[in-house]
Amino acid sequence: MDKIINNPDYSRAKSIHEFTVRNLKGELIKLESYKGFICVIVNITTNSQLTKQNYKHFNDLMEQHGDKLRILAFPCYQFGDQPLSEEEIAKHAEENDVKFDIFARIEVNGEGANALWKYLKHAHPIGTNKQVNVIKSNFTKYIVNKLGIPVERHGPEVDPLKFDQLVISYF
């Protein structure tokens, strides 16, 4: 579906605000609508041991900082999880009282990787070899400043509760 969206070349983009993504209903969402907010962009799954904890802590962050912060979650099933449809993902979000934005399923690695995620990996790579710059697991989190520029990358081992301390410095 990403080919239908006219996103920029990820290697030349200056911010996430240049990208358009799909929500769970298939509607196009321009990320420029997040200008002025600190964003945490995360790839999620509905059936991981980390899901409940991350959802709860993301909800807590939204309750504490929702006037300055947005969490953009992208379901990804490239790591051995049983994939769900957009409808099932939406139902799961409702059952867990999700207060953050969940978008359509994507891939974060490989040829089918979503353009936004290619940009995130390019703009804030891990290690020094960009050719092997891959997302290794779900719940990889990027902190994006108010200008839409990725400023930090954290793996799944970093609890979203710690993000309270991390994101405050960007307000």
Image: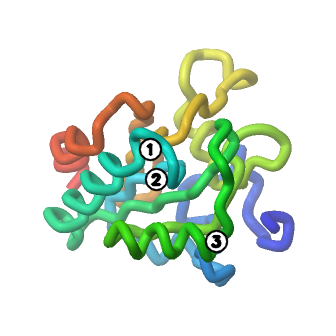
Compared with residue 5, is residue 106 higher up or lower down, i.e. above or below?
Answer: above
Secondary structure type for disc 3: helix
- For the residue pair 27 and 36, the one nearer the viewer reads as 27
Q: Quadrant of the N terminus?
A: bottom right
Q: Residues within 10 Å of mark 1 (few under 14, many from 20)?
A: many
- For the residue pair 69 and 122, the one nearer the viewer reads as 69
* Left-right relation of 59 to 43: left
Asked whether residue 118 is in view, the answer is no
Q: CA distance from mark 1 to mark 2?
A: 5 Å
| Label 2 vs 3, first from the N-terminus | 2
- For the residue pair 12 and 137, the one nearer the viewer reads as 137
Secondary structure type for disc 1: strand
Compared with residue 109, is residue 129 higher up or lower down, i.e. above or below?
Answer: above
Marks 3/1 in contact by CB < 8 Å: the verdict is no
| Label 1 vs 2, first from the N-terminus | 2
Which residue is disc 3 drawn over? 86
Q: Residue at x 35, y 51 (%)?
A: 52
Compared with residue 114, is residue 50 higher up or lower down, i.e. above or below?
Answer: above
Marks 1/2 in contact by CB < 8 Å: the verdict is yes
Q: Amino acid at mark 1?
A: Tyr
Q: Residue at x 26, y 62 (%)?
A: 59
Residue 35 in the image, given as x and y percentages of width and height? 41, 70
| Label 3 vs 1, first from the N-terminus | 3
Residue 158 in the image, given as x and y percentages of width and height? 33, 32
Q: Amino acid at mark 3?
A: Glu
Which residue is disc 2 drawn over? 41
Which residue is disc 1 drawn over? 142
Q: Residues within 10 Å of mark 2 (few under 14, many from 20)?
A: many
